[in-house]
Amino acid sequence: PHTRMTPLRSFSGLAAVLLVVACLPSARATLIHRYSFTDGAKDGAGSVDGRLLGAGATITGGELVLKNERSAYGDKVACLEFAGPVLPAGGTSASLAVWFTAKSIGGFARVLNFGDSEGTEGKQFLYFTPCTEEGLARVAITATDATAKTYIDFDALDDGQSHLVVVVVDGATQSLRVFVDGKEPRPAQPLGDNT
């Protein structure tokens, strides 16, 4: 299935750069994808280009702009869809870094949304939202069941300021970590069955 960087509710924001670094069992950390949005949605480090979906998705001045001010849950929204899997099969660790600005977004709008986070059973996903319905930011991952996800909540990031968020799935320590503007706002969480 395609992988999307998809806001699911109203969202007005941008991503200037998206980086994906993976560590395969027998390799060192390697930059495998880079989307700087200076040449459309071309992958500057790999071969998985993105394509814009929805009327509110544009690339302007090296920034991916996703305007979904009037989108409701379940509506087709502006997003970036990748032509194939972005996270490699067989990898044990990955880091996703995204520079973004979000303002006035609805609960659970997604800056990153890999996999299928709708429903509960048999779902595999990784997502980052700058603001939940409870007014917190969240990074979450699951291997099989949305109700058994591993997640980290931290202060909301829908303040109209530019932020760097790095999501780390650490296979060596079997933990989920998040860094915001160079700092870890909450301790790492054990992945458990989501390893």
Image (cartoon, rainbow, N blue to C red):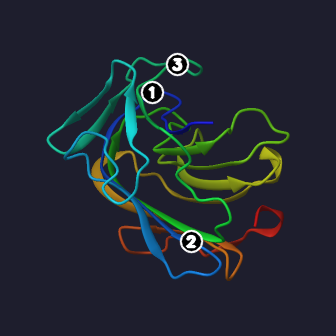
Q: CA distance from mark 3 to mark 1?
A: 6 Å
Does label 3 or label 1 sit earlier along the sequence? 1
Question: Residue at 47% across / 48% down in the picture?
Answer: 130
Kind of residue sitting beneath label 2: Arg
Tell me the kind of residue under disc 3. Answer: Ala
Numbered disc in front, either 3 or 2: 3
Q: Position of residue 17 (x, y in %)?
A: 30, 54
Instruction: Give the CA distance from mark 2 to mark 1.
Output: 26 Å
Element marked by disc 2: loop
Mark 3 residue element: loop
Badge 3: residue crowd in 10 Å (few <14, some 14–19, many ≥20): few
Across and down, in percent, residue 80 comes to: 41, 35
**Snapshot quadrant of residue 44:** bottom left
Question: In the image, 116: left or right of 52?
Answer: right
Task: Relative to 82, say whether 19 is above or below.
Answer: below
Give residue 139's position: percent from left, percent from top.
58, 56
Residue under pointer 2:
186
Q: CA distance from mark 3 to mark 2?
A: 30 Å
Relative image position of residue 174 (x, y in whole percent): 71, 76
* Contact check, label 2 and label 1, Cβ < 8 Å: no
* Residue assigned mark 1: 10
Q: Badge 3 is on which residue?
A: 72
- Residue 52's place in the image compared with 112, above or below, is above
Q: Is residue 55 above or below residue 148?
A: above
Does 173 sit above or below residue 138?
below
Residue nearer the viewer, 34 or 97: 34
* Badge 3 vs badge 1, beta-carbon distance below 8 Å: yes
Q: Given the image, on which type of amino acid does mark 1 rest?
A: Ser
